[in-house]
Image: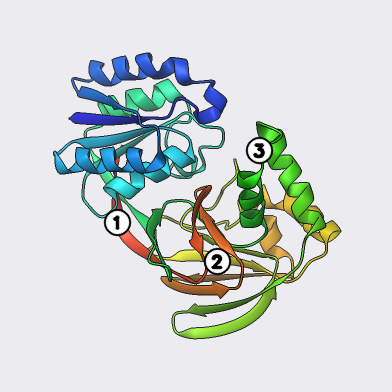
């Protein structure tokens, strides 16, 4: 293959940036030509990925879920082969696809890969004209607000900023009124947490939509009714096991197409900001051609 390697040296807090030369070497050892692509902006990374697809190259993303997310914007529904070299903190999408979690082992698997398999992706369309793809989970409740607050903060740096954002959002916690249409059936409800998943986890292993299958042509939805601060925090540890869905205050749905609206809510997918609600989210079967 002729490979465009989208590399994010800051993924995983930069701990694996030094592995880039070895990743390139292992890909080349499989007989592939490798062109390393870096960019100073998210849009720049996506544009270079799209250029690689137009030139007939395969695209490999080296980084965390955010870097993979950018790669998906370039390859989704194009038929271009796509590989993942996980080098982030959580790597949820790669883990849930059953890919090697070790950076160098993943590069070796891609180098030796002679086949691809089809994987579903989710396509988001916003009322503001935004169009985006995601592979893992879209958050449109408490976790989305935490991301939005953390992105506005300039201090502290690192993971403490996210932890502080959680505390501040808990203090500001309130339910929102949502309107959701699933397969032509509309409901209106108040909630503090809404998530739509193509695969089951986000945030480094939070199995928010357990059982989500990226090959079944459907998306999974989890909705939690209005909860107090203490109740929400008691529920969150259960998410690692996926047992929160057995709580009577949590509802689950499965559908190919979801329309979701709420005032003052911004959707985040794969940890990346997408757009304000309302949005329409649709599963596109086989939209990703994954190198295995």
Q: Is residue 234 above or below residue 93?
A: below
Nearest the viewer among 31 and 46 is 46
Q: Regarding mark 1 in the picture, which secondary structure is present there? A: strand
Marks 1 and 3, how far apart in space?
Answer: 40 Å
Looking at the rendering, which quadrant does residue 183 occupy? Answer: bottom left
Nearest the viewer among 104 and 154 is 154
Q: What quarter of the picture does the C terminus occupy? A: top left
Q: Is residue 26 above or below residue 131?
A: above
| Residue 38 image point, x, y percent | 35, 28
* Residue at image coords 42%, 36%: 99
Q: Position of 127 compared to 246: left or right?
A: left
Find residue 221 and name its label: 2
Q: Position of 23 compared to 142: left or right?
A: left
Q: Is residue 206 visible?
A: no
Mark 2 or 1 closer to N-term?
A: 2
Asked if the residues shown at circle 2 and circle 1 are in contact, with their CB atoms under 8 angstroms apart, the answer is no
Label 2 environment density (alpha carbons within 10 Å; few <14, some 14–19, many ≥20): many
Label 3 environment density (alpha carbons within 10 Å; few <14, some 14–19, many ≥20): few
Label 1 environment density (alpha carbons within 10 Å; few <14, some 14–19, many ≥20): some
Q: Residue furthest right?
A: 230
Q: Which residue position holds label 3?
A: 154
Q: Which label sits in the foreground, 3 or 2?
A: 3
Q: Which residue position holds label 1?
A: 286
């Amino acid at each position: 293959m002729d490979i465009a390697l989208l590399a994010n040296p800051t993924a995983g807090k930069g701990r694996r940036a030094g592995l880039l030369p070895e990743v390139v070497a292992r890909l080349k050892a499989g007989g592939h030509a490798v062109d390393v692509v870096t960019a100073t902006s998210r849009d720049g990374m996506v544009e270079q990925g799209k250029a690689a697809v137009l030139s007939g190259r395969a695209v490999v993303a080296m980084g965390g879920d955010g870097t993979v997310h950018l790669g998906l914007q370039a390859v989704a529904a194009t038929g271009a082969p796509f590989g993942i070299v996980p080098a982030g903190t959580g790597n949820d999408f790669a883990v849930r696809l059953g890919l090697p979690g070790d950076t160098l082992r993943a590069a070796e698997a891609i180098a030796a890969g002679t086949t691809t398999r089809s994987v579903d992706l989710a396509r988001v369309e916003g009322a503001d004209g935004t169009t985006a793809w995601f592979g893992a989970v879209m958050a449109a409740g408490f976790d989305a607000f935490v991301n939005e607050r953390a992105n506005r903060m300039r201090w502290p740096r690192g993971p403490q900023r996210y932890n502080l954002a959680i505390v501040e959002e808990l203090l500001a916690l309130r339910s929102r009124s949502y309107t959701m249409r699933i397969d032509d059936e509309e409901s209106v409800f108040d909630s503090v947490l809404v998530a739509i998943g193509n695969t089951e986890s986000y945030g480094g292993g939070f199995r928010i939509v357990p059982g989500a299958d990226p090959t079944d042509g459907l998306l999974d939805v989890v909705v939690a009714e209005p909860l107090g601060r203490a109740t929400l925090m008691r529920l969150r540890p259960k998410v690692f096991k996926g047992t929160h869905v057995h709580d009577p205050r949590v509802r689950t749905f499965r559908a190919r197409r979801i329309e979701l609206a709420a005032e003052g809510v911004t959707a985040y997918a794969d940890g990346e900001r997408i757009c304000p609600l309302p949005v329409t989210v649709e599963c596109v079967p086989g939209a990703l051609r994954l190198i295995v």
